[in-house]
Image (cartoon, coloured by chain):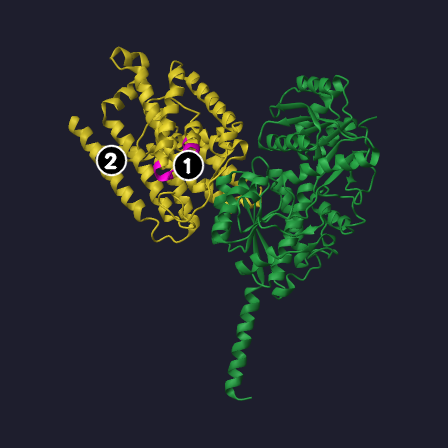
Chain colours: A green, B yellow
Amino acid sequence: MNRRTLMLSAGALALSARAARAAEEVVIGLVYPLTGNGAQVGLDAKVAYELAADLINGAAPPIDTLMAKGGGLDRLGGAKVKLVFADSQNDPQKARAEAERLITQEKTVAIIGSYTSATAATISQVTERYEIPYISADNSSPSLTQRGLKWFFRPGPHDEMFTKAMFDFYKDIAAKTGRPVKSVSLFYENSIFGTDSAGVQRRMAQEAGIAVAADIKYVANSPSLSTEAQKLKSANGDVLMPSSYTSDAILIMRAMNEIGYRPKAVMAQAAGFQEPAFVSGAGALAEGVMSRSSFAPDAVKLRPAIPAVNAAYKARNNKDMNDNTSRQFTALMFLADAINRAGSIKNTALQAALKASDVPGASLIMPWKGIKFDENGQNTLSNPVIVQLGGGTWHTVWPFDLAATEAVWNVGT
Amino acid sequence: MENGILARRRRELITGAVVLAALAVLPLPIADVYTRNLIIITLLFAGLAQAWNILGGYCGQISLGHALYFGAGAYVATLLFVNAGFPPLIGMFVGGAVGGLLALLVGWPCFRLSGHYYAIATVVVGEIGYLLFLNWDYVGGATGVYVPFKGDSWLALQFKTQKLPYHYVTLAFAAAAWFAAWLIEGSRWGFAWRAVRDDVVAARSLGVRVFASKMAAAAISGFFTGLGGAIFAQYVGYIDPESVLGGQFSILIALPAVLGGVGTLWGPVVGAAVLMPVSELSRSYLGGSGRGFDLMLYGALIVVVALARPQGLVSLLGRRRERARAA
């Protein structure tokens, strides 16, 4: 070996060492409400993301699911994932400023967020301008993927898909039991969540030829809902479809009980009805309540990794994974997989890898068919499920092939 | 005596010009986007607090419903742009005009109330505005309005990643509000308004038209607040009722003025210069832990100032000057 080749190889060594060092850490930004209203959701999310990162990096015992085998990002020389959290205080302006800070100061390769759709609206504008991918883990407003953004990716379902699942369920259960839904009662709170939800439900009921027996909008956090309960009783639709947060959800169940009314079926737009506080607060009255969900915690036959992930999460946060935390966990695992497939942290390579995603559902903890985006960045394979409360816990009852339990269906009896 | 006042006013104008010049060159050596954003937000709130100060400070009419004028300005300029392609650079003045008009509409019945009752009435009116927009489909209802990005443009007040243009827009806004307050301080109106603030009965006995004074102060205050709202909307790129019409915004607008010194020329500026950096920096560097330290710090600062200097931070400057003169 002469001196020249020695120098060249030394140079190459130095270069590769530098490349490896550069790839030691991949920084991912997360914008969530960590204080103020919505803080609990943000703090739970933080635990879910930290668990996901530890699984990727090998700081937690490996689990047989996407990217959870440890060892970092193998196609980037085993680079570790580093998370940087920022507090949006659930304010769109602050969320925007934090996203900008994460990109320019922390040099994040992507941003994940953000619980509320209003904060996602501004964060995704920043990521679009800086040409950095935004992974929408848990924002469910359909308007977000109707803006033609090129750096916006939503692996989870949006609200229209959730509501469609309810009506698909009505069709399937009618075919199965011969007892169709003829009318529904809409009951919803007056902010963005409730009015949007009811708007879609009204339209889909009409399309399905189902009558709207009652259409009741109420003021959120009402001290009393007894008038509303009376109206629901006199309308007596086959299915009560509430869109409410926790305290209102408990209140309406109690108010209906007080006047001796029990709807044949209740199909909730998740939210308050899926909170543990509802299950304990409404007690026996909550039995048989159905809800849409993007997570099927009992679908362990098809998704055998769920118990291990849930146990690891519960050990850290003393509660089970839910609709939100499961989607957040999945968002980071999916993003890590995409970075790994890109084999680079360059923005255009990552964007291309995200666009080309075709992740099989079996590798996720979600009941989805997989992850594959349309041109607006919406995952078209994220089918929601319908869950039902029985004995104080949620059971998946639809789609039937995922269901661990038969649905209790009293309509038409 | 006359000369003393004139000299003081001239000195204030010169100080203003020097501060303006300093702020104009301030961002040039700062390349960091985050710091530039911090300065922009501070300038915006300095202008908004000054607008509030014109009604709440000089005229003594405490309004806790300024979010209404702010939101109206934001919505008007944004909807004109999104639905009719009307450039926000001009549309923001329409937004300001609507803000001023609304302030007159609110003032017409509410100025018949005095003291705390006016403040309570403005809270209610602000809340009505919020609920109205929340349920009004034409303005996007609860979903809000996205401002589509169409490339860098001064007319549209849109810039992909540049911060400097926004710096000059908000600086111009804050300077205009400051200059308006300066003009008011030395004018016949300003004297009449302060008389209304100090003692309504005495003011009326001296021939001050009380109702007209309040209305004029409200219109000017509403105009600048609406203007600020329009700028905010273009800067953030998305508005919804919660973020521009929410009750907390009315407080945020008044807070720098109250903390800095109500009814003073420099109070709102000093208040914003202290509050906004504390709020932004503490959130960014302490907020990520999720333990709420940032909000504790922010709250503690307000409590300390309220206890130690109820007249506002700006009185610290004044006291030193008096002491210097006495010496």
Q: Amino acid at mark 1?
A: Ala
Above or below: residue B45 compared with residue B115: below
User: Can I make out residue B199 in this image?
Assistant: no
Give residue A271's position: percent from left, percent from top: 66, 34
Q: Secondary structure at mark 1?
A: helix
Quarter of the image with the C terminus of chain A in it = top right
Q: State the image quarter where residue B212 is shown.
A: top left
Reply yes or no: does residue B78 show up in magenta: yes
Q: Local crowd at mark 1 within 10 Å, few (<14), some, or many (≥20)?
A: few
State the residue lying farthest toward the bottom: A2
The foreground one among B3 and A186 is: A186
Above or below: residue A89 compared with residue A221: below
Give residue B277's position: percent from left, percent from top: 43, 42
Q: Chain of mark 2?
A: B
The region drawn magenta spans: B73-90
Q: Is residue B270 left or right of residue A163?
A: left
Residue bearing the label numbered 1: B84
